């Protein structure tokens, strides 16, 4: 009788230890599957460097002498205004007509929304509108 009580107690302890081992193993497996990696990724995430949208500025009838000046702003990050936090894309269409054609600027966001450029087209006004330094 005493021997059977000791065997029952030993058997019960073995079952409890086995159950605890299995539970801890299952928790470990679940934790390693869902745990985010704490190690830094070797590949940088490009999402951090993408702007939320782009603004495309189409300049028409620009004097060819100034086309390169306008293109200096192509690909720059916009700091303020209706295109804030966007990347500026500039398309310059030059004019060889010497009769002083009217220069125009049309801005469109990547969502297709037209944006009004309220100034006369020149380098300083573009710098002011997009807050370039």
Image (cartoon, rainbow, N blue to C red):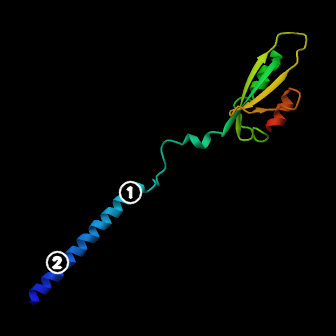
In the image, is 104 to the left or to the right of 75? right
- Marks 2 and 1 in Cβ contact (< 8 Å): no
* First-in-chain label (2 vs 1): 2
Front-most of 123 and 17? 17
Q: Quadrant of the C terminus?
A: top right
| In the rendered image, the vertical position of residue 94 relative to residue 44, given as above or below | above
| Image position, residue 17 (x, y; %) | 24, 73
Front-most of 109 and 77? 109
- Dot 1: within a 10 Å radius of its alpha carbon, few (fewer than 14), some, or many (20 or more) residues? few
| Image position, residue 19 (x, y; %) | 26, 70
Secondary structure category for the residue under label 2: helix
Q: Which of the 4 quarters of the picture holds residue 99?
A: top right
Front-most of 41 and 92? 92
Of the two numbered discs 2 and 1 in the rendering, the one whose residue sits closer to the viewer: 2
In the image, is 112 to the left or to the right of 5? right
| Image position, residue 58 (x, y; %) | 76, 24
- Dot 2: within a 10 Å radius of its alpha carbon, few (fewer than 14), some, or many (20 or more) residues? few
| In the rendered image, the vertical position of residue 18 relative to residue 76, given as above or below | below
C-alpha separation, residue under disc 2 versus residue under disc 1: 32 Å
| In the rendered image, the vertical position of residue 82 relative to residue 98, given as above or below | below
Question: What residue is rendered at 76% in x and 20% in y?
Answer: 92
Q: Is residue 92 visible?
A: yes
Question: What residue is rendered at 32% in x and 62% in y?
Answer: 26
| Image position, residue 123 (x, y; %) | 84, 28
Q: Which of the 4 quarters of the picture holds residue 23?
A: bottom left
Label of residue 11 in the image: 2
Secondary structure category for the residue under label 1: helix
Q: Is residue 133 visible?
A: no
In the picture as drawn, the residue positioned furthest to the bottom comes out as 2
Q: Which residue is mark 1?
A: 32
In the picture as drawn, the residue positioned furthest to the right comes out as 99
Q: Quadrant of the N terminus?
A: bottom left
């Amino acid at each position: 009788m005493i021997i059977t009580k000791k065997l029952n107690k030993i058997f019960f302890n073995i079952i409890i230890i086995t159950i605890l081992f299995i539970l801890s193993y299952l928790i470990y497996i679940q934790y390693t599957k869902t745990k985010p990696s704490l190690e830094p990724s070797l590949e940088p995430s490009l999402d951090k460097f993408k702007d939320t949208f782009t603004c495309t500025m189409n300049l028409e009838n620009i004097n060819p002498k100034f086309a390169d000046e306008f293109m200096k702003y192509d690909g720059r990050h916009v700091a303020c205004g209706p295109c804030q936090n966007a990347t500026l894309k500039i398309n310059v269409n030059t004019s060889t007509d010497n009769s002083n054609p009217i220069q125009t600027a049309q801005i469109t966001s990547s969502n297709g929304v037209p944006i009004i450029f309220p100034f006369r087209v020149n380098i300083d006004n573009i710098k002011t509108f997009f807050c370039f330094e």
